[in-house]
Image (tube, helix red, strand yellow):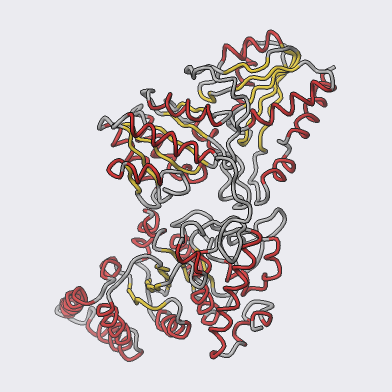
Amino acid sequence: MFLEQIEKTNDIKEIRPEDYNALAEEIRQFLIQSISVTGGHLGSNLGAVELTMALHLSLNLPEDKIIWDVGHQSYTHKILTGRREAFVNLRKYGGISGFPKRKESDCDCFDTGHSSTSISAGLGMVKARDLEGGKNTIVSVIGDGSLTGGMAYEALNNASRLETNFIIILNDNNMSISENVGGVSKYLNNIRTADMYLDLKEGVYNSLHGKSRYGDKVVSQIRRAKSSFKHLVVPGMFFEDMGITYLGPVDGHNITEMMRMFKEARKIKGAVMLHVITQKGRGYAPAERHPARFHGAEPFTIETGIPSKPRTKANYTDIFSTVMCKLGQRDEKVVAITAAMPDGTGLKRFRNMYPDRFFDVGIAEEHAVTFAAGLAAGGLKPIVAVYSSFLQRAYDQILHDVCIQNLPVIFAIDRAGLVGSDGETHQGIFDLSYLSSIPNMHIMAPKNKWELSDMIKFAVAFAAPVAIRYPRGEAFDGLKEYREPVVYGKSEPIYEEKEIMLLAVGSMVKVALEVRRQLKEMGHSCSLTNARFVKPIDEAAVKEACQKHKLIVTLEENVASGGFGEKVRACVDSLHTKTDVLCIAIPDEYVEHGNVELLKQEIGIDADSIVEKITAERRRRK
């Protein structure tokens, strides 16, 4: 096996060119086998095998730098830098991450996880290189999906001013360019990047520039004539007009051809965009047929591609999907917005049923929110479905464009709380804090699947901004008998006793049930209240709890700073009562990847850890 010869960085350069394709096939089979067991991002990695190999063959890592946009396609990069054996613990607690991590390898030069960042980061590294007098090559890899993000264009605009080499690879697995245009473009690229052409162009420009009063005019006329001709035949003129040299398209599964193009790209003194065409899911039929399903795959059976542990219960995304379809039928003013996540957020069915009221804006969360504000200002009822971790990219738009105007935009925040295997960049543990800081924002969290439905219906009828946050995974179906109507700013008592009050937010209600059971077995009298609202908190309920209980315990799946617990503590302090407050929350730190239940134990928000903290607090206060 050729793959076994890859033990460390740059070992791939010992592989003979005639064996490149065999190595690529071995890498694909290794990825399929590994991810079928651990889960992970399969489709994007299968499509980037040859591209990654060509980069490693052409560059000298770690001196040269590769910045992977998002980073979920970096598995082959990890294999080629000596981490193949670590894939047995891919995305597990204590194992390697599914994204580039600087602490893992000096070949991972920049941590990523969110999209549209690689060009900005790469440009920064280019300027640092130039200021330090370095000569290494900087390459940013960005996908066609990530290129829909506005930040990418901000970076391109800035990169156009470069006078030193910076290579941007557009990994395109979606858009198509006709063969005849591609052939002409390829021919032009050969001319424009040939040593003789580059030397001649630079020599002519330098000779004419500033030599006489006519020199600069001649240079300008040459450039205009060249640009007019290229507009007819070059498909990348959008980039060329920005001042970025465009090369391609090139077959992203032809290693030799890509290596040749990388060599040409390194000659250019400025930013260069190399357009590479790849096939997502290449080499594995189920992933080729259903690329969205294998974007982030759960463990699966290789022969069929079917998950090895199929879900038996609906998750919160399923519940949201059903409610949205019903709301769309009842109210024609309800519209839905997603930032390139119709499947992940559960809006696929709504899109199929009401295509005119569904809007996928691409990977552009900032635009999604302000677009929703415009829809609301126009009299519609927009619902923005987004992951918690991605919504934080649009903080300014929420504050400035939605909440200042008090527009009735609804934020359906999926993956709120710990999400597990994707790690620090994807944990949805900050939304209660950053949303609570914004005036006119109202925040709710459901305890179970029925309450999620009720809260969405409440929000649609509410004439102000509303955020509803719910976790990843199976929807809790307990406490069905507790379904009082949602009333603005009011919590929901579930069990009323004395001594200890458990005041839980959303997903932590289920945990609080187990905490209460254990405390009662220990002889403690324990109440349980479902907070429902995080902003505004139910101050009347807090005041009543102080009158009846010696200890109030707040439980939330959010960081402590700026969270629900802080608000309750401030309320209790203002009452000048003797009641103590114990805040159970995620520590103010980034939480790495791993199984969610294991992570809860590690950070102390599982039932057993909470019981220990409560009993310790009671002993301390006696």
Please determine whether, in this image, residue 174 is positioned above or below residue 232.
above
Image-based side of 132 in relation to 549, left or right: left
Please determine whether, in this image, residue 392 is positioned above or below residue 543.
below
> Can you give x and y, in whole percent of width and height, for residue 72 in the image?
54, 61
Residue at 66%, 63% (x, y): give it.
104
Image-based side of 145 in relation to 109, left or right: left
Q: Nearer the viewer, residue 21 or 115?
A: 21
Q: Nearer the viewer, residue 421 or 371?
A: 421
Q: Which quarter of the rendered picture does the C terminus lie within?
A: top right
Please determine whether, in this image, residue 365 is positioned above or below residue 62.
above
> Can you give x and y, in whole percent of width and height, for residue 143 in the image?
43, 63
> Can you give x and y, in whole percent of width and height, for residue 267 in the image?
40, 82
Numbered-mark total: 0
Q: Quadrant of residue 33?
A: bottom right
Q: Which quarter of the rendered picture does the N terminus lie within?
A: bottom right
Q: Quadrant of residue 554?
A: top right
Residue at 24%, 79% (x, y): give it.
209
> Can you give x and y, in whole percent of width and height, for residue 521 in the image?
83, 22
Q: Nearer the viewer, residue 155 or 490?
A: 490
Please determine whether, in this image, residue 212 is positioned above or below residue 490.
below
Q: Quadrant of residue 399?
A: top left
